[in-house]
Amino acid sequence: MGIGRANVSVMVVCAFIAVALCLTTPVRAQTNHSGQINADQTWSVSGNPHIVTSNVTVNMDVVLRLEPGVFVCFNQNTSLIVNGSLRAVGTSGQKINFTSTKDTTGGTPGVHDWQSLKFTASSVNDSLVNCVIKYGGGYYSSGWRVAPTIDIAGCSPMMCSSALREQCRR
């Protein structure tokens, strides 16, 4: 028995649909970050997840803006150090997430997975609005002292409608 003309037509249509689905299925992006930020930047949802592979420092007079819905995922013992300005303003429906890479790429996230959001005395006009901050407070390089998940030194970042979850409980 040979393949009938109707069966060939069905197979061609199925192959066409399969190719169309492959071409229209979005590929999940990943954007890696490390080192110094020397000019204003915006991290967008299209770059999710944003992976902090080693410490990221926002230099003085520089603004880092995070769009609503952005996921910032930290490798172990990494921090975002703000000497300039961090503007993380999410919405109630699209929160900005600061979390462990294990939370989005596999593995079991846990307390102390990454270190801190560090706001230094030179940082200004910082905003954390509608943010969720999870699994931070890692150990300092000496290994004996736990870093605060949000480390504030001589500045006043605004935090509103945000939550700290899965943090060290003492």
Image (tube, rainbow, N blue to C red):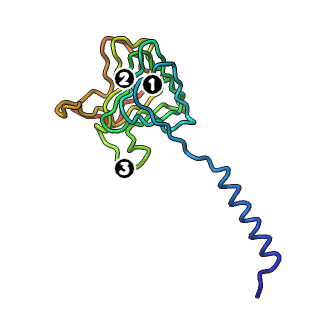
Seen from the viewer's position, the closer of residues 74 and 110 is: 74
The x and y percentages for residue 36 are 41, 24
Viewport quadrant of the C terminus = top left
> What residue occupies the far right of the structure in this picture?
5
For discs 2 and 1, the disc positioned in front in the rendered view: 2
Residue for point 33% across, 12% down: 121
Where, by quadrant of the figure, is residue 162 drawn? top left
Q: Position of residue 92 (x, y in %)?
A: 52, 29
Pointers 2 and 1 in contact (C-beta within 8 Å): no
Which of labels 2 and 3 is toward the front?
A: 2
Q: Residue furthest bottom?
A: 1
Question: Residue 61's quadrant in the figure?
Answer: top left
Foreground: disc 1 or disc 3? 3
CA gap, disc 2 and disc 3: 26 Å
Whichever of callouts 1 and 3 sits on the residue coming sooner in the sequence is 3
Number of marks in picture: 3
Q: Residue 148 vs residue 156: left or right?
A: left
Lower position in the chain sequence, tag 2 or tag 1: 2
Q: Determine the image quadrant of residue 135.
A: top left
How far is disc 1 from disc 3 in space, using C-alphas? 28 Å
Residue 100 in percent (x, y) is at: 37, 39
Quadrant of the frame with the N terminus: bottom right
The residue tagged 3 is 107
What residue sits 77% from the left and 81% below the top?
A: 3
Amino acid type at image mark 3: Gly
Q: Residue at the location (52% across, 29% down)?
A: 43
SS at mark 2 in the image: strand
Tag 2 residue:
81
Residue type at mark 2: give it.
Ile
Residue for badge 1? 161
